[in-house]
Image: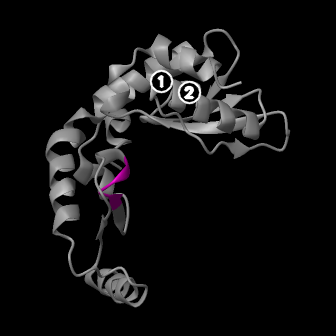
Amino acid sequence: MWEAQPYYDRPFAEIADLFDTVYVSLYKGLEGVRGAVLAGDRETVDAASMWRRRLGGATPDSWHAAVTALMGLDEVLPRMAEFRDHAVGVAAAINADGYATTRPRVPQTPLFHVHLPVPKDVVAAAAQRILAESGVELPRHPRSSPDPTRCAIELTIGVVSLEFTPREVADLIRRLR
C-alpha cells in the first residue's frame, strides 16, 4: 500500500477502506529491519496474533525493528512519490533501446521487473562481477523464464537508487550479459 498510494493519489485511509484487512510491511519499501502491521476486525487480528505466536513470530526483543520502522514511516514514506517518479524515468531509459523491457512498461509503483534476453546464470554472474568491480549491487538472483535464453530481475527504487540517474541504471542493466 505504501508504494501504490502515489499512483492512486488517494489517502491511505481511503485505499484501506476498500478491504476487510490491510497488511503493510515495515521493511521492504520503508527500508526497515523487519515486521509488519495487520489492521482489521478484532476477530481476524486476534486469530492472526495467535498464529504469529505459534509460528515463532512473537520475538521478545523487537525494539530495534520498531525504531527502524518508525524512521521509515517518518523519513522514507513521504518520499514514495519521488521513488515512483524516478522508477518511471529508469524504466523509460531501460526500454529506450529495446535491449531490455520493463513490466509494466510504465511503472505504477517504485517496483517493477526488467526482462532480459540473457540466461539467468549469465545475469547472476554479471551482477556478481559488477558488484566486485564497482561496489554497485544489482539483483543477483534473476527469475527464470520459460525460454531458457531469457530471465527477469526485480528493481525497487528507493533512497539509494536516487543516487543514480535513469541513464546510469540503464547502462548497468545493459552490462548484465
Residue 62 pos. (x, y %)? 21, 71
The residue pinned by badge 1 equals 134
The residue pinned by badge 2 equals 130
Q: Is 4 placed left or right of 174 in the picture? A: left
How busy is the neighbourhood of tag 1: few (under 14 within 10 Å), some, or many (20 plus)? Answer: few
Query: Which of 88 and 35 lies nearest the eye of the viewer?
Result: 35
Query: Which of 22 and 118 lies nearest the eye of the viewer?
Result: 118
Q: Are marks 1 and 2 in contact (CB under 8 Å)?
A: yes
Q: To which quarter of the image does residue 69 belong?
A: bottom left
Q: Is 104 placed left or right of 82 in the picture? A: right
**SS at badge 2:** helix
Q: To which quarter of the image does residue 68 belong?
A: bottom left
Q: CA distance from mark 1 to mark 2?
A: 6 Å
Which quadrant: the C terminus?
top right
Q: Residue furthest front?
A: 132
Q: Which residues are magenta?
A: 24-28
Q: Is 145 placed left or right of 89 in the picture? A: right
| Amino acid beneath label 1 | Ser
The relative height of residue 33 versus residue 39 in the rendered view (above or below) is: above
Q: How many marks?
A: 2
What label does residue 81 carry, if any? none
